[in-house]
Image (cartoon, rainbow, N blue to C red):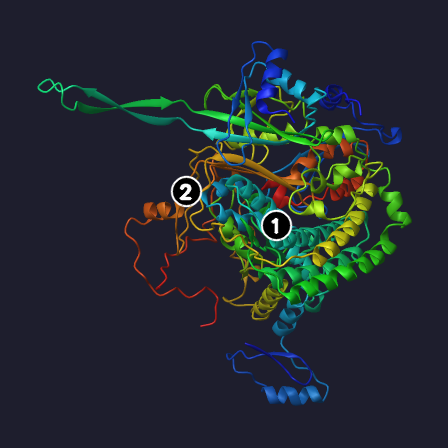
Amino acid sequence: MFKRDPEDGTLSQDVTPPPPSVTETERDELRRQGILLTTLQELYTWGNSHSVWPLNFGLACCAIEMIAASMAKFDIARFGSEVFRPSPRQADLLIVSGTVTKKMAPQVIRLWNQMPEPKYCIAMGACAISGGPFKQGYNVLKGIDRFIPVDIYIPGCPPRPEALLHGLVQLQKKIQGFKLTGPDAPRHFRDDQPCNCPVPEFGEHDLEPPANPAVWTAPPAIVRKD
Amino acid sequence: MESPEQIRDRLLVQFPGAEISVVTNPGIAAQHSLLLGAAHARAIAEFLRDDPTLRLDQCSNVTGIDWPEKEIVETTNISTPDPANPAGPPTVVEQKTKRLQPGFLEVVYHLYSITHRHGPVIFRLRTGNRTDQATVPSLTPVWCSCEFQEREVFDLFGVTFVGHPDLRRILMWDEFKDHPMRRDYVEPDDYEWEPTPHGAVLEKTKAHYPTPPTPAAVAPVKGAAP
Amino acid sequence: MSVPDFSALNAERATPGARVREVHDSFHGDLLEVSMGPHHPSTHGVFRMIVTLDGETIVKLKPVFGYLHRNHEKLGETVTYLGSMPYTDRLDYLSSMTNNWAYALAVEKLAGQAVPERAEYVRVILAELTRLLNHTCLVGFLMQDCGCSGTPLMYAFREREYILDLFESLSGSRMMCNYQRFGGCRVDPSADWLAGAQKLTDRYGTFLDEFETLLTGNEIIMARTQGVGKLSPELAINAGVTGPMLRATGVNYDLRKVDAYGVYPRFDFRVPLGDHGDVYDRYMIRVLEMRESIKILQQALAGLPAGPIMDPKAKLRSFRPKAGEAYGRIEGPKGEIGFYLLSDGSPNPYRYRIRPPSFINLTVLEDMCLGHTVADAVIILGSVDIVLGEVDR
């Protein structure tokens, strides 16, 4: 979807419609003359995708690997995401790094609601995706996507720091594909879609409601062929 | 260190009339334990802590165990002589009697001595039943290490500790009504399809899918490249 | 040693307000209740404490648990004995090898399973590597809490990667090793692996020297940690505090010496003891324990015998121990980690209970924090060395 120019390293997007009035070769030629032609959309998403600030928020085992990813060996700073913000008001990215218990779920959703748009969510690890090894536990939420929309899922128990970096790069690609206007524009550019998710209440036996129907539907029954 | 029998004999001298018996452990570990009655439990605990030869100053571990009521079927053979042939073999009639063994909750304490470096001395307290008499005396005033552990047993098993300074739920939220570590706890039904269920999950799968779904192509993952 | 008056100790503990040492008069005011956590950058995960402040001074502190309650004990009743082994990795996810060992030890007690000598040595090597890993990370996190933002944690995680590389090449997983089995270990370490462990052991002392040059004599750290969060030995014993926290108060109690499990009696090592029971002592105990761990590692690597790594008679599939119960414990990096197993003769345990050291060590959190400020409470919590996977289970 994206390719990087081998000479000067700029990113270019091969979106087919609408047909560009200036071709790629013409743009390259102009760039050699010192004239940069770009679209506002490209510029915006380029800047947005390379300064994704995660929330300094660890849940369980995966949080240790998240810290490891920000340390010397893996160095998440190479991708512009080393600024772990302690406050949700300053963060763009919620990395749900670990098991979300039912007791913790309302807090996670409240943090998500406190983050300003544009905001993204990475479900890191098997527990955040589906409950993982603890899926059958009475206090374990079967995936954070039951309550908030998730952009990137990173499988693993726990995923290696490299996997987190890969997930981050995938998120950057996703952001670079965003349209600023029109019906394909993401949630935060549109008036008709809510940014916040309702926070469930503690019930007598379970969370009430146990899932947010606006973002989650039960998965279909998939039977493996073997 | 003294054997549980010796400790029992010494305790019976110290506390005449106290209910103390030795519960033998049939396993290979042979960690036998003492079963204490509720009336003298607190005094006995203080004695065990301060007695110069035992000095069990550390209460390491507090565990709850649920023993639900179970139906015991006893088979007795009643042999009656054959009236036609008294010398011959008697007719044997099997008679089955059903007996309901009442359920109870049990709290097990593991004690060690840091001063004398010995242990464990294990003792158990039992509740009257699992519903309205689920109380045992709290030993938090004797060893404050019991404080959180007894709260945990209260939360997960529903044993009320009389004399505990701060008996609240500790792991589940305050509005929660059930005691999830009991054997008959029914967890909220938030079943989600799993491709390879087994064990208890298979039972849930059968309840939700009385006729098993036919093998189908694995649905494409949302958002993946076609 | 005379008998301490535990009853008076507990009576004082139960009296609210009796334990606050001093409140600065100039800051005297209305009581303010602050909820720290479950999302707080310094609570080491999803721990929450409700702190009541008089001015700046803490007069009450109530920890709130359960935000990572993952139902280990209930799940342990639904899976087989071997099936619980991967779950133990996820209890204290910084030291999975010692969790494995504690669980394997409890099951071996329950089933009367013998362990070959080579496996015992390998277990000691892995447990001491885990101790190095855990204590290094803890010191990094503690210094992060003190305000040394970045550098010590960066150094700690650099060393952690070297140890995790060893774990990964042995067990296949960085953090969740799932390596020990009832009656031995899963795979035999190769000569290359042992050479790598030897290299790391030889080098680790140099790293500790570097670490200590940075931290131990540092004036700011001393001013920040000395005399903060004092714990008396009587209260520590009565509250079931174990591990480096207990030894920092001066109580000589190390399960490696007391229970003499495994092959620990064969090694020559000392038990470092503290004097004041404050945060600085807890830091020093960890550094000194790491030095002792290096000594144990050198001896264990030199004396590693040849032989099988698994007891050939050990049963893994259709493993049904006789009915009965057993409690097994070892000295984990955080304290006494124990497993209580109750078998009814079926493939699953009837009761599977974890004795979590950091959960029980938190009993004295309020006692240590009273009279201090919120900034001190953060480092006191850091010095307890909690991992929420184990606290809440």
Mark 1 nearby-residue class (10 Å; few <14, some 14–19, many ≥20): many
The secondary element bearing badge 1 is classed as: loop
Which quadrant would the C terminus of chain B be assigned to in this image? bottom left
Q: Tell me the number on the disc at residue A36.
A: none
Residue A25 is at least partly visible in this image: yes
Q: Tell me the number on the disc at residue B189.
A: 2
The secondary element bearing badge 2 is classed as: loop
Give the spatial CA distance, label 1 vs label 2: 25 Å
Which quadrant would the N terminus of chain B be assigned to in this image? top right
Using the image as rendered, state which of residue A140 and residue C92 is in the foreground: C92
Q: Chain of mark 2?
A: B
Residue at the image position 80 percent from the left and 59 percent from the top: C207
Residue C71 is at least partly visible in this image: no
Residue at the image position 8 percent from the left and 19 percent from the top: B84
Residue C104 located left or right of residue C218: left
Instruction: State the image coordinates of residue A135 (x, y, percent, origin top left).
Output: 48, 48
Q: Tell me the number on the disc at residue A60.
A: 1
Residue C101 located left or right of residue B217: right
Residue type at numbered disc 2:
Asp
Instruction: State the image coordinates of residue C93 (x, y, percent, origin top left).
Output: 63, 50
